[in-house]
Image (cartoon, helix red, strand yellow):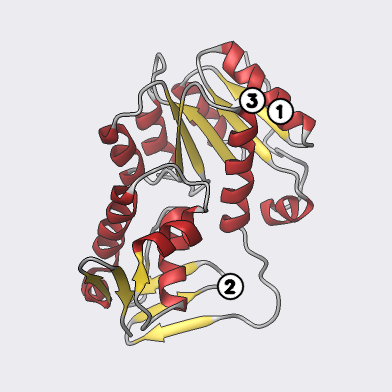
Amino acid sequence: MLAYSPCGFGREHPEERAAKGMYNILVVDDEQMIREMIKKYAVFEGHKVTEAADGMEAVEICSHTTFDIIVMDIMMPELDGFSACREIRKTCSTPIILLSARGEEYDKIHGFELGVDDYVVKPFSPKELMLRINAIIKRSNPDAAGQREIFTLDGLRVDFTGRVVTIDGQRAEMSPKEYDLFFYMVRNRGIALTRERLINDVWGYDFYGDDRTLDTHIKLLRKTLGPYSSCIVTLRGVGYRFEA
């Protein structure tokens, strides 16, 4: 039976750990060799790794322990990665990277719709995976120094510092990547943002996906924004613009 502590990585807040470059990572894969390979590289860089052999175990661990990021395989016994992500997303918005032996577009889109932050196809480079982990955590835990940065538009309130979006008084639930994309667009409101710029600045220059990843997240954002979905304007042949 896997042993773990509810205290996770001591009593430090996730943002405090991220500031020090130390992450508490949950690695979920039914292949022990894959788990050990990821753990070897992560521990070498000073991070803490907890392992789970299937989705059920991952969901159970996440009910007791807070992680900075989760790396999860899709094809697993007991509970597959998609189902595990769906359960985990009910209680937390911890960034998730999915691993898969298949590179099918459907899997990627389905994962992004569930709120995952990245998708890596096996076989992969452990070094590349660690770079992706670093990039995602840094974007998910920006420094919150100085005064609070808040944008309001009628009933839409965007608290950049607290990473909270409220619509007519109700808190909007978004995945970490949706927050990143939305905050970027709001900060650059009124500016025509090309698809290339959005992907490079939000996902990173080393992103290996395609334009449909961006389109899927825009679709999810519009659904979440409800009456304010029209603020995100499609610029045919160019990209998107947030209009205030």
SS category of the residue bearing label 2: loop
Picture coordinates of residue 92, whole percent (x, y)? 49, 47
* Res 233 quadrant in image: bottom left
Q: Nearer the viewer, residue 163 or 112?
A: 112
SS category of the residue bearing label 1: helix
Q: Can you say whether 155 is above or below 125 in the image?
A: below
Q: Can you say whether 31 is above or below 88 in the image?
A: above
Look at the image and tell me whether residue 67 can be seen: no
Q: Nearer the viewer, residue 115 or 87?
A: 115
Residues under numbered marks 3 and 1 in contact, where contact means CB atoms less than 8 Å apart: yes
Q: Quadrant of the N terminus?
A: top right
Q: Residues within 10 Å of mark 3 (few under 14, many from 20)?
A: many
**Residue ID for mark 1:** 41
Badge 3 amino acid: Ile
Report the Cα–Cα distance between label 2 and label 3.
32 Å
Badge 2 amino acid: Thr
Q: Residue at x 60, y 19 (%)?
A: 35
Report the Cα–Cα distance between label 3 and label 1.
5 Å
**Residue ID for mark 2:** 161
**Residue ID for mark 3:** 38
Q: Nearer the viewer, residue 100 or 15?
A: 100
Query: Disc 2 or 1, which lies upstream in sequence?
Result: 1
Badge 1 amino acid: Tyr
Report the Cα–Cα distance between label 2 and label 1.
32 Å
Look at the image and tell me whether residue 238 can be seen: yes
Q: Along the horizontal axis of the image, is 220 left or right of 46? A: left
Q: Along the horizontal axis of the image, is 161 left or right of 91? A: right
